[in-house]
Image (spheres, rainbow, N blue to C red):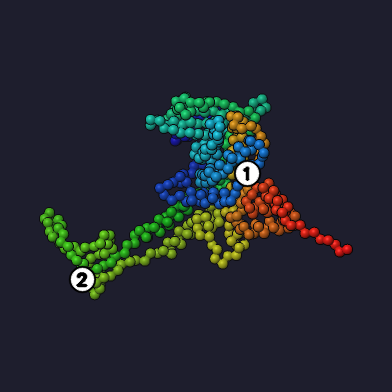
Amino acid sequence: MNRFKQIVSKIAKWFGIPIQTKTEQPKDYSEVSEISWTAAIANRLATLTMLDSDISIKGNNLRAKFIDNFTQDYVDDRMSVAAEVSLGTGDCLIKPYTDGQRIGVDIIANDSFVVCESIGNYIKACIIKADEITIKAQKYERYETQRLRTVNGMSVLFIYQQAYKNGEPVPLSEVDTWANIKPEMYIPNVDRMLFGRCKCPTVNRENINGVNGVKVTYGLDGVMQKAQEAYNRFNAEYESKESFIFADSTLFKPVATQVIKPDGTLSTVLKPTFAAGRDKIFMQVNNSGTGVDSKKLIQEYSPNIRHESLETGLEVNLKMLELLAGLSAGILTKPVTTFATATEMKAGLQNTFAFITKFRKSLEKSTNDLLYAVNVLCNANDITPMGDWTAEFDWSDGYIENMQDRFNQLMQAESIGAIEKAEVRAWTMNEDLETAQSRTKEIAETEPKIEFTGAE
């Protein structure tokens, strides 16, 4: 049992709460010495998920403005990271923290937290490895336990902080940066954890009712190994190919060189001279040498590379990886577009788009929970005055639908009165609806008015 599991077991036993066992998965997402197909797929899907998408905060007060600024920083800097980590490892926590004035975000990887109590995806207790620091070769870890309980009919969130040194409990004050952290606090009228949780939509086939997520390539380690072997074989073919030019010794200017014979005596021999690096290309032979045509002074040995067959082998393995992961071609392989109509190309992307759409639901929930936690921190630390706000998500479907098709749809909807002109402008000019409405009104007021006078 590793140290994390040992400490979590101690904490869970101390509070008398169970631990929901996680499915063991190879940690190939964090592999950096070799190719990680999981990381490649997770990165690609996270990019497509966030493509041309945005989150905006609506509200006309200081709290709404603060939350909006936080949200834009999160979307620009951390949201795609959270998306990739959750796809690559199964799930992750997006946990805000504050110094009393500003709020930052930590992304807690799958192997650094354990869900203890939950109903479906609603978490009631969780143990988190919140921080780690090494001081004079001593490893210190800080664990945070969040637990929702009902007190006198009111939902209360209890937060406990504990420090460990080399796996053994110590006071928080042993680490200067943790000295001012309260070991225990509670927040009333809170109905959820103070973090968001993003979960990969891949099904855990070993435990379909399990609350923990699994990586996007879950169960495909054998397929990934085959793809890695095909890739290595492709490169090995190139590395092992060396072209030689066999040249008769009479073509080179000999230089006297002393060599040591097996009996230890010195002997002077004549060796050809080569330009720097050419000694790996030219091979000197006597024209009577075995295997060399004595009638030719120069011959070339350059074996052909099985380029097409090796590339096809790699492509087949990567296509199988995409297929078994429930994705369309084009994530790791080249998309098939030859002789395909626009409708056929869209159909070929449906699997990936369906996966992305489902994953966006998880991102949306985790972001709403994150913003809820940020709002609670604002209240607890008096960062800004209280105020109402709402989050609006604008997910793009540009991956499967081109801009011309979308524009035509908007124009048709406006022509029959289903939407207003401002909505068309908002999409076309990438403006919020309020700004688009204002500009549409200004344009309408500046247009010349033509008046018709009836005949007398």
Relative placement, left or right, of 333 versus 53 is left
Instruction: Identify residue type, mark 1.
Output: Ser
Residue 286 lies left or right of residue 223; in this view the side is left
Q: Residue at x 60, y 47 (%)?
A: 54
- Residue 234 position by quadrant: bottom left
Q: What residue is rendered at 52% in x and 55% in y?
A: 331
Q: Secondary structure at mark 2?
A: loop
User: x and y percent of residue 244 in the render?
Assistant: 29, 65
- What residue appears at the point 45 percent right and 58 percent down from the top-left corner? 314
Vertically, is 303 above or below 99? below
Residue beneath disc 2: 288
Camera-nearest label, 1 or 2: 1
Q: Nearer the viewer, residue 67 or 142?
A: 67
- The answer to whether the residue labelled 1 contacts the one labelled 2, judged by CB atoms less than 8 Å apart, is no
Secondary structure of the residue carrying tag 1 is: strand
Q: Quadrant of the N terminus?
A: top left
CA neighbours of label 1 inside 10 A, class few (<14), some (14 to 19), many (20+): some
Quick one: 171 or 67, which is closer to the camera? 67
Which class describes the residues within 10 Å of circle 2: few (<14), some (14-19), or many (20+)?
few
The amino acid type found where label 2 is placed reads Ser
Q: Residue furthest front?
A: 456
The reply to whether residue 212 is in sight is no
Image location (x, y in percent) of residue 57: 63, 41
x then y, percent, for residue 192: 61, 34
Q: At x 43% / y 54%, what residue is drawn?
A: 228
Residue annotated with mark 1: 56
- First reached walking from the N terminus: tag 1 or tag 2: 1
